[in-house]
Image (cartoon, grey):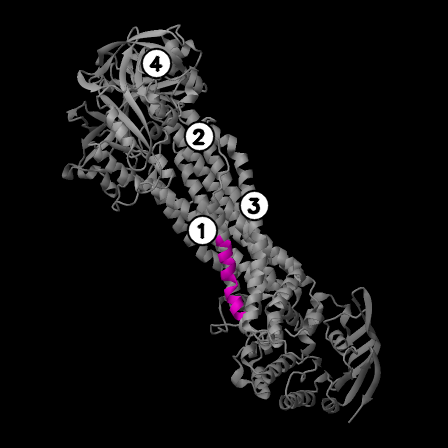
């Protein structure tokens, strides 16, 4: 057997170029698998840590527990840690209002650790007993309190009651004005032990601006326990329910996002996204394994004759198979470890490029994106590569075992055509003998055909699938962005109408110029006659024969209503009347068609200008609105303010006068370049739910640009690897057919004729590959659409045909380029020398 | 009528840095309809001579005229056409195109020329070669003799100026070898097809009417026999 291994080693050294190509392909394929898995694992780890940092390190929570029950819970199955929080109460310092509101939580030390509250501590420490308090610097500054660590603070603690209903206002919701009353429960003096920063980006803790320790002597059951499990698995749900039942409570919430990142989720939407990502990863691994298999079989194919010669001198089948296996082992031993190292290195490089951006966008720098590589990943990649190598040498090994010299010389085992040769086909009709040669050559070696077309198919399918995923995600993020790339409005908040003048003057005082528009918005219903509805969107209507439909009604401030009219070429003067008139944006997206599983977008109504709508709000009739203009199509600016799944009726704000008052909330949207400053100003005023849309949009845009960049880099890398595979396969094919090319030259085929034959062959490979790849890609494209549309905002299915065009052109370029490159070998063809060889 | 004239052709190969003189100034001429056997020891330069005559290998120096035309004055495209129309080559190991059937292999030079295949001529040739029942078969489905007959058919189909055969019977048993030589002889007599055959076989050489003997790249004997 030793001599067999020696021969194998020498053969590999002799065909140095082929050996290096094979090892290089193995390295690249293994590194591709490693990059994908390591990258995914690193990002997953980052998302887990990010969720723990901002949402808390817990898997489920149980509310309504006493301290005793807490201790019981800590000793239950699969419970590693229990963080506890209790709403102590609210307090107003000085005059009641947003600025003076204090929401006090009692927590245990596990809560501080598991909810990552340490970074918010500016001075001092967190309380260790119920007489100590740590509170936010914003509260102290807003109320002009010159207190610091060590000082005492007396507070009247109680409940905020809303609108005379005994429903507690929890945490830091905005001050409800006259609708709210305060019922004091106790007076308490606290020692200030810590000063905290703003906790707006924290999870559970952001509802509070003051913390004390839980009073363990209390027997009341008003603690919420957040459970950190020892082991995270699908059994968590059953265990959690059992634990809650044992504690005789049913209140139970799961930390769905964190569980999703651990792959333990009940949420169908998250599951679908996970499935989509898993599918892509598996496709990449399969493509990598297929390439390894192909490159080894090429290497073995070239040695088939030598193996036949071994037969003639007495080598047994077992010995020849051993030679094949040894070759696979040597190539794998060289390629797999290098591939793993290259993959890890490449992952580290990619992560270092995106780290800063990623961290800033997702976690404001608090969580680090580090390279994570589980030993299972290395085993999986090695295993996949080794399996591919083993499978690749099964067939050649079997052939090698049986092949004789005569078989090889007669090429009976190399060239065979299973199917009946058709004398004429479309290709030979168009291209004559060149077409006949080309079309038959691609069928003569099914394995070679599959290798080339399979590689091209893999490149096209993977590329388009990844692109689809990124494209749909970016589309989701861009739904509220204008054509110039800016969002329609920068800042969003809701506040009582009477507070709007304060907001305007505060912004002016801080030199923040902003275009402020505000509106009331309500869902209202109306009934429609049969001829007034679009039968193609019958799913929009309910209520049987009444054809009742919901319309999203916006009462827009006067100035911006006029602007809206001007933008849409409408005469605003028509609306300056005493009766209510409005513009109907007649477009909605949802499952409204005949097929309830298909999302469509369209005009639900068939209404003329001048139609009178009798609207109802909460079973109460509101003044009738005359529709002066019906506008169809996608008016993205309006739908970004409103909703996409309903038609929108915009009326002047004055139409709402009869049933709204200044205590009612209005939605305020601002356009200002100083959006960050505006948000800070509003937060200082005590508005805690101000959304900086511009900043979020910029974040999303950067994230998705990164996503697109990552996809492009990966697709380029993958295309390069696959091109190498195609190049290898094609050059091998050309090499093996040198004798045949010499014969053709000897009977008068010119170099031009040879090139023509090869180009037709290349075209046939490409066409056959694309005929399968493009429909499969479309199918995956549709599956991606369903996953993402179901999990996030629904939208109508679309196909980015430009991407398909690029993929087609790229596939064609790969094959033609490889053929042309290989034709250099033919230029050096010495006809006489090749003809002397016996085939 | 002179169909082929060779003037002082030399061919030198570079092998591992050392020059190998395969042909050292060979000159001769051939009349139309002659049947010539080229004999010589292994490595004497016979095949090299044949390849040069067939337009496959360029001589280092010297001239080759076929039907009055200087073969190597032509560019590559013209040489390909020359090989298609003026020359028919037959090899020891057949060298058929494995994906083409018997009749497609035979008509290949004509189809490369873009001409319509003369079906009558094809039918006649197939009959003469005894390949009528095998016309749709691939080379892999034929015996050695059948493959060689296909190769002869390909060489003869276009009625070239000269047919060059390099050890056409070297891979065949005696019965098939005789049959092949009879075919070549028949084509020579019937169609006045000028034929040059390289052979080691004395009996085959004696079937020719002229013998050229090559030794160490030189023409040492040019004898008309029979």
Tag of residue A474: none
Marks 3 and 2 share the same chain: yes
Q: Which residue is label 3 attached to?
A: A341
Mark earlier in primary sequence (3, 2): 3
Q: Residue at x 36, y 15 (%)?
A: A134
Question: Dot 3: few (<14), some (14–19), or many (≥20) neighbours within 10 Å?
Answer: some
Q: Which residue is label 2 attached to?
A: A362
Q: Identify the subunit bearing mark 3.
A: A
Marks 3 and 4 share the same chain: yes
Q: Identify the subunit bearing mark 1.
A: A
Mark earlier in primary sequence (3, 4): 4
Q: Secondary structure at mark 2?
A: helix
- The mark closer to the camera, 3 or 2, is 3
**Residue A522 in view, yes or no:** no
Q: Which residue is label 4 attached to?
A: A133
* Measured Cα–Cα span from mark 3 to mark 4: 52 Å
Residue A705: percent from left, percent from top: 48, 35
Q: Identify the subunit bearing mark 2.
A: A
The vertical placement of A505 against A223, above or below, is above
Q: Which residue is label 1 attached to?
A: A283
């Amino acid at each position: 057997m030793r001599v067999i291994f020696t021969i194998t080693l020498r053969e590999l050294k002799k065909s140095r170029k082929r050996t290096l190509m094979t090892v290089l392909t193995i390295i690249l394929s293994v590194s591709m698998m490693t990059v994908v898995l390591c990258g995914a694992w690193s990002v997953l780890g980052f998302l887990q840590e990010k969720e723990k940092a901002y949402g808390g390190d817990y898997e489920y929570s149980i509310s309504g527990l006493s301290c005793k029950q807490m201790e019981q819970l800590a000793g239950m199955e699969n419970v590693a840690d229990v963080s506890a929080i209790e709403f102590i109460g609210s307090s107003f310092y000085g005059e009641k209002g947003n600025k003076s509101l204090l929401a006090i939580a009692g927590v245990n030390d596990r809560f501080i650790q598991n909810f990552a509250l340490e970074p918010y501590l500016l001075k001092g420490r967190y309380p260790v007993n119920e007489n100590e308090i740590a509170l936010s610097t914003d509260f102290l500054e807003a109320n002009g309190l010159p207190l610091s660590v060590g000082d005492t603070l007396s507070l009247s603690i109680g409940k905020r009651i809303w609108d005379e209903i005994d429903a507690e206002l929890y945490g830091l919701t905005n001050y409800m004005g006259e609708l709210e009353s305060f019922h004091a429960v106790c007076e308490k003096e606290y020692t200030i032990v810590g000063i905290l920063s703003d906790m707006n980006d924290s999870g559970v803790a952001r509802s509070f601006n003051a913390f004390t320790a839980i009073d363990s002597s209390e027997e009341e059951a008003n603690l919420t326990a957040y459970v950190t499990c020892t082991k995270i698995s699908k059994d968590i749900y059953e265990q959690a329910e059992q634990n809650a039942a044992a504690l005789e409570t049913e209140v139970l919430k799961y930390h769905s996002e964190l569980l999703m990142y651990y792959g333990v989720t009940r949420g169908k939407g998250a599951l679908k996204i996970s499935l989509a990502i898993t599918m892509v990863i598996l496709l990449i691994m399969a493509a990598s394994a297929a390439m390894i298999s192909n490159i080894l079989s090429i290497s073995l194919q070239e040695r088939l004759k030598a193996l036949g010669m071994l037969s003639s001198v007495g080598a047994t089948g077992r010995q020849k198979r051993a030679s094949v296996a040894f070759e696979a082992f040597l190539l794998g031993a060289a390629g797999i470890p290098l591939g793993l190292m290259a993959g890890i290195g490449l992952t580290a490089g990619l992560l270092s490029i995106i780290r800063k951006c990623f961290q800033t966008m997702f976690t404001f720098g608090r969580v680090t994106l580090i390279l994570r590589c589980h030993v299972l990943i290395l085993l999986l990649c090695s295993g996949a590569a080794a399996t591919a190598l083993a499978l690749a040498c099964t067939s050649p090994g079997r052939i090698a075992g049986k092949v004789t010299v005569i078989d090889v010389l007669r090429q009976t085992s190399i060239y065979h055509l299973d199917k009946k040769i058709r004398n004429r086909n479309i290709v030979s009709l168009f291209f004559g003998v060149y077409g006949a040669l080309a079309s038959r050559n691609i069928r003569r070696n099914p394995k070679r055909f599959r290798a080339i077309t399979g590689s091209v198919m893999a490149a096209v399918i993977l590329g388009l699938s990844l692109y689809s995923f990124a494209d749909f995600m970016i589309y989701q993020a861009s739904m509220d962005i204008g054509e110039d790339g800016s969002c329609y409005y920068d800042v969003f908040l809701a506040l009582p109408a009477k507070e709007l003048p304060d907001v305007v003057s505060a912004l002016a005082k801080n030199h923040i110029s902003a275009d402020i528009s505000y509106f009331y918005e309500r869902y209202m219903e109306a009934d429609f006659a049969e001829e007034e509805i679009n039968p193609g969107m019958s799913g929009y209507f309910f209520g049987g024969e009444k054809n009742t439909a919901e319309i999203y009604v916006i009462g827009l401030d006067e100035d911006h209503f006029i602007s809206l009219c001007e933008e849409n070429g409408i005469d605003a003067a028509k609306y300056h009347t005493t009766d209510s008139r409005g513009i109907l944006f007649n477009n909605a997206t949802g499952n409204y068609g005949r097929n309830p599983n298909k999302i469509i977008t369209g005009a639900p109504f068939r209404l003329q200008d001048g139609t009178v709508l009798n609207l109802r709000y909460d079973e109460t009739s509101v003044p009738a609105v005359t529709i002066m203009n019906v506008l169809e199509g996608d008016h993205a600016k309006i739908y970004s303010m409103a909703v996409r799944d309903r038609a929108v009726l915009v009326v002047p704000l004055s139409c709402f006068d009869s049933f709204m008052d200044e205590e009612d909330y209005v939605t305020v949207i601002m356009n200002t370049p100083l959006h960050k400053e505006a948000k800070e100003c509003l937060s200082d005023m005590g508005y805690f739910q101000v959304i900086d849309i511009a900043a979020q949009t910029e974040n999303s845009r950067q994230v998705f640009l990164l996503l697109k960049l990552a996809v492009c880099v990966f697709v380029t890398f993958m295309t390069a690897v696959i091109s190498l595979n195609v190049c290898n396969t094609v050059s091998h094919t050309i090499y093996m057919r040198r004798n045949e090319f010499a014969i053709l030259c000897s009977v008068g085929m010119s170099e031009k004729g040879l090139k023509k034959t090869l180009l037709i062959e290349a075209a046939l490979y490409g066409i056959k590959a694309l005929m399968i790849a493009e429909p499969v890609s479309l199918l995956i494209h549709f599956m991606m659409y369903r996953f993402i549309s179901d999990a996030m905002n629904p939208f109508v299915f679309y196909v980015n045909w430009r991407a398909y065009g690029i993929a087609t052109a790229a596939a064609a370029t790969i094959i033609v380029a490889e053929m042309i490159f290989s034709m250099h070998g033919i230029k050096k063809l010495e006809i006489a020398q090749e003809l002397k060889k016996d085939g | 009528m002179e169909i082929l004239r060779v003037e002082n052709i030399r061919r030198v190969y570079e092998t591992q840095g050392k020059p190998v003189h395969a042909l050292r100034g060979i000159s001769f001429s051939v009349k139309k309809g002659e049947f010539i056997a080229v004999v010589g020891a292994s490595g004497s330069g016979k095949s090299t001579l044949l390849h040069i005559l067939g337009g496959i290998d360029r001589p280092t120096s010297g001239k080759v005229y076929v039907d009055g035309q200087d073969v190597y004055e032509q560019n590559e495209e013209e040489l390909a056409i020359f090989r298609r129309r003026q020359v028919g080559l037959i090899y020891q190991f057949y060298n058929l195109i494995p994906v083409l059937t018997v009749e497609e292999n035979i008509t290949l030079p004509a189809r490369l020329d873009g001409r319509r295949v003369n079906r009558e001529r094809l039918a006649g040739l197939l009959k003469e070669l005894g390949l009528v029942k095998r016309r749709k078969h691939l080379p892999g489905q034929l015996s050695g003799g059948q493959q060689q007959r296909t190769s002869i058919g390909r060489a003869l189909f276009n009625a070239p100026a000269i047919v060059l055969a390099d050890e056409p019977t070297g891979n065949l048993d005696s019965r098939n070898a005789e049959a092949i030589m009879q075919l070549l002889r028949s084509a020579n007599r019937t169609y006045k097809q000028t034929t040059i055959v390289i052979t080691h076989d004395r009996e085959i050489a004696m079937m020719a009417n002229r013998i050229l003997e090559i030794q160490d790249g030189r023409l040492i004997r040019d004898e008309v026999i029979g």
